[in-house]
Image (cartoon, helix red, strand yellow):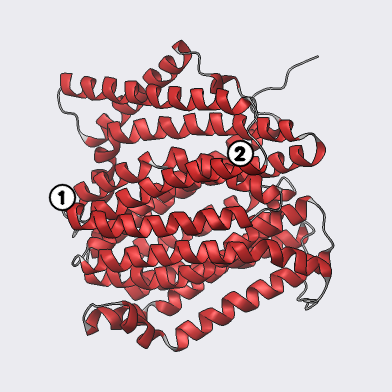
Amino acid sequence: MKRKSLLNGESGHLVLMLVLSVATQCVALLKSTVTASAFGASMEMDAYNFSNNIILFLFSFLSSGITAVIIPAYVQKRPGEVTDSFLTFLYLLVFGGTGLIYLFREPIIGLLSNRDAAFRQAAADVMLYTIIIQGVTGILAVTTAYYQCSNRYNIPKVILLGCNCLAVVLILLDKNLTIPRYLWFLSLAALINLVLDVGIAIKCGFRYRPTFRFRSPGFRQLLAIFLPCVFSTGVYRIHALVDSLIAASLGDGQLTILSYANMVVSLVNTIIIGNLTVYAFPKIVARMEGQDERAGQKALWDYSMLFQLAVCLLIAGFFAVGQEGIDLLFLHGKFSRDASKMVYIGSCIYLLGQENNIIRDLVYRYFFGKGNTKATFRNSVAVSCANLVLSLVLVQFLGLYGIILGTVLAGLLSLVMILGKMKKNYGLFPEFRGFLGQYLLGNLIMAVSILAVLALKKALPVLPGPGAIGLYGVATLAIFLLTAYLFRAKALQVRL
């Protein structure tokens, strides 16, 4: 029997999905480069990021509901009136809350911020744009879930890439770019994205009709799964909002620097963690539905092993060439070298926590597949409280870096705690011990690769940014893969 090529079938879909995500993020980076050059790390950008975090607080409930409830409901083929009722409830909750926040935006911003009147007014002025941008993203989470469950992962990514390109072209053509005009371009691209995405989803068979059967047993079951997510997401977003408040209080530009470091990590989350968990989640649920408990856990640990090694490779690459990349992207116009250095250091700290986060996210989805969101809720509440305390303590000694380090330490605590809950509720089969050994091996491979490339950089003459990125990026990849092969990393044997 002829073996399938790497780029055929499911593996081909994943590779294409990753390529599209990389292209989309490259366009997003170009947009951020223009933004950093035009506005720098300024009070106005702090105000925009502050306003965006307030709106994101509400729309994160929508995304958590889609992940925890709608995707399993689609996989399990629940009746349409049940999922439609749940989505109607979710939209009423989120958009109603957003409308109230917008109406009372000035007193809310004044209550949350200790900055001057100019900052508060700037944050209030841009809030409508942030509502449009985040609102479109929230609506499209539903169609994205539909595409995922029908194995059409890449349709929304192609549309998003095209719309991001349009936004970047409009921004580049504007010779007198201001923050309101910049946000208007982003809002226009988001609305075009909405029309195209929903239109194609409907053509592919997606249907949604506002339904108000809030007393049906099916709706109550979904609501029982969703409510713990509301509280866990709420605690997490409150912590994120407090982080923004702390960063904003450190002085002009600190919140913007934190946002750019977050953006670098979001790039990793989108390209690697987001895509891989999107790819793996329906398959883990299917294994859990169709086979025994051990088969579901084997799929979980196999994917965790592979994805953790992929994130370790990215971390090694960023340590090797991240400063050159950050300088190339941001060190223009009004963005200073000190700000660029802070973005790099902050991004390095953030990235160190991502290998734990991808494993935790997969374990969370294992719980979601079981319909158990109470355990993840309790875990998120405890960890978010710990995160808040850590950030408040560490910021006193490390400034902005203390906020980031608190988040990383809390992420590690989150993984340890959810594994404890998994052992208590479902047991940990022998495959977990094998995964744990490979987890430690992945970190060893990453450390060897970083040290080897840093030694190579010290031995060779200083190269210009693009040359350094090319040479040391290839060197990191080669050293990492060679080391993984020599150590016989089992992740290399995992089949998608």
Q: Amino acid at mark 1?
A: Arg
> Can residue 367 be seen from the camera position used here?
yes
411 left or right of 460? right
Q: According to the image, label 2 marks what residue?
A: 423
Which part of the image, by quadrant, shows the N terminus?
top right
Residue depicted at 56% across the width and 34% down the height: 304
Residue at image point 20% right, 47% down: 341
Note whether 34 is above or below 13 in the view shown. Answer: below
- In the image, which is nearer the foreground, mark 1 or mark 2? 2
Looking at the rendered structure, the kind of residue marked 2 is: Lys
Crowdedness near tag 1: few (<14), some (14–19) or many (≥20) residues, C-alpha within 10 Å: some
Q: Secondary structure at mark 1?
A: helix
Classify mark 2: helix, strand or loop: helix
Residue 227, placed above or below residue 121: above
Q: Earlier in the sequence, mark 1 or mark 2?
A: 1
Q: Which residue is mark 1?
A: 337
Determine whether 361 is above or below 391 in the image.
above
Callout 1 touching callout 2 (CB < 8 Å):
no
